Image: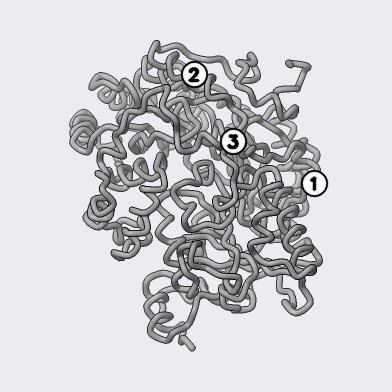
Amino acid sequence: MIDLINVEKPARYTGGEFNEIVKDHDKMQSSYAFCFPDIYEVGMSHLGMRILYHVINRRKTTVCERVFAPWTDMEQLMRANKVPLFSLETKKPLKEFDIVGFTLQYEMSYTNVLNMLDLADIPIRRSIRTDEHPIIMAGGPCAANPVTLEDVIDIFLIGEGEEVMNEVLDLYEDGKSAGQSKEDFLKESVKIEGVYVPKYHDFDKKVIKRIIKNLDSVSFPTDSIVPYMNIVHDRASLELFRGCIRGCRFCQAGYIYRPVREKKASTLIEQTKRILADTGYNEIGMVSLSTSDYTDLKTLCDGMLEHTEKRMVNLSVPSMRIDNFSIELMNRIQKVRKSGLTFAPEAGSQRLRDVINKNITEEEILTSAKIAKSGGYDNIKLYFMLGLPTETDEDVIAIAELAGKILDIFGRKSRINITVSTSFFVPKPFTPFQWCPQITVEEMIRRQRLLRSHIKEKKIKYNWHDFNTSVVESAISRGDRQVGQAIIKAWEKGCKFDSWNELFDMEKWEQAFSECSLDIYECASKQIALDEELPWDFIDIGVKKSFLKNEYQKALREETTENCREHCNNCGIAKYRCGVCFEDNKI
């Protein structure tokens, strides 16, 4: 046993939280361990995990329990005391579950997937696991390119999980009752739409992603678990819609979650009432890729405030677009508590914003700053990317110039604090920029220094992202099975928690790729020909490859594309026959 007094944050490992679901395993037909490959505070902030935990546990025949990556202090104690990785709810060892499922949210968590399997005494390679081991499953946005982990994962779920998860669990439980083996289950599961089984896939066929056509009709966890400790996003979450109408050319989520499907305001207001009754949170976050694009936001905010304001519950509205930020919206969201404002222009110059199809003008950015000033805001965060395709030094300097213009609006002697944050462009599968190279490390450093040299005002703070992790992320995101072997090598060398600066080790990653006859920097900065076959081409996310190619070519011509509510651009997603594609008889 482990004495939790010896670890930094014992609440990460105790379970027993308010609204936790505990079932008797002996009365269930199957057991599912939902694994988040990061620490508790990160995993418990993820809405997708909360949704699927709720969906699976609504089944009368299935138990779902949570498992997170233990921090290094806890892992050391577990290995020293030979304690295998266990679930929070019943402390059941991971290897005793029927199915172990990982959510793949970020490429830099892949070594944690391997480490968690090893901590559970489960072989990391599927080829050496037997019927005595759990089925290893994975899903989430990074599963859009499953190839890098296909030597590890038995079965991938492509797309949204609420419906396909139930179909897979039904199949497993039926097979288990009939005495079928794990291999029998895997062979049968390939018949389910949205399922990719590496061992049995017919590559003459595409794996078609699954989506939920009507979000009002699916269950949503208003009684989500309330942690005993602070987590990254320590609030209740309300999902407004999925997808995005905008088509920013660097944004993977904007393509793989198409089409936009909104919940009705009445549904969301009722869910707000239930969240307030079931959790006790003092803040509700309105979750989507672009919250201010919700078509009935006024009705929604007014309806939610009718219940939240009298209880002094704050409404958090992240993911706001600069071009539809208004005084009216600002006045609504600051009724209970005023917080800072965050905007993402992504690029400093209009030319580069047109290249990436951001479709916002400098005038709209500055107008938003004036609105923020009139509302009394004194903390503004601005997010940008460095290294976007076709970026020049003038584009980099334009970031500093834009921040300066916003400062001028507030006044140099005002209380305003402006934070400029930059990350590096990472090419992602299923985006128009999937063929583009990432800039070299030398260029990353040079452009960071160039921008920093042009930010001279004390009221403008500059934060920048580490370039090495961006290189690894880029190399993995467009990787193939050989890159997958390098990931395993990196873990064998001790890599884990690679998104945490204090544990990231670039030298080990370089060595791991080299031992697999790869150059990690060449993998990251590779220019891919438009006619080249891509490792993920057998996955069908609904958006046509020809559309992505056309968008890439338009980017090089600095041409923009209208958003989905203004005009249908025939991306291919209309085949799902739902959402924005069919509103107002557009198609």
Give the image location of residue 93, x and y in percent: 57, 77
The residue at 37%/59% (across/down) is 488
The amino acid marked with disc number 2 is Asn
Label of residue 204 in the image: 3
For the residues bearing labels 1 and 3, Cβ distance under 8 angstroms:
no
The C terminus lies in which quarter of the figure?
Answer: top right
Label of residue 258 in the image: none
The residue at 30%/39% (across/down) is 523
Front in this rendered view, residue 516 or 301? 516
SS of the residue at dot 1? helix
Is 357 displayed left or right of 398 in the figure?
A: right
Label of residue 359 in the image: 2
The residue at 37%/15% (across/down) is 351
- In primary-sequence order, the first of circles 3 and 2 is 3
Is 442 displayed left or right of 65 in the figure?
A: left
Q: CA distance from mark 3 to mark 2?
A: 38 Å
Label of residue 270 in the image: 1
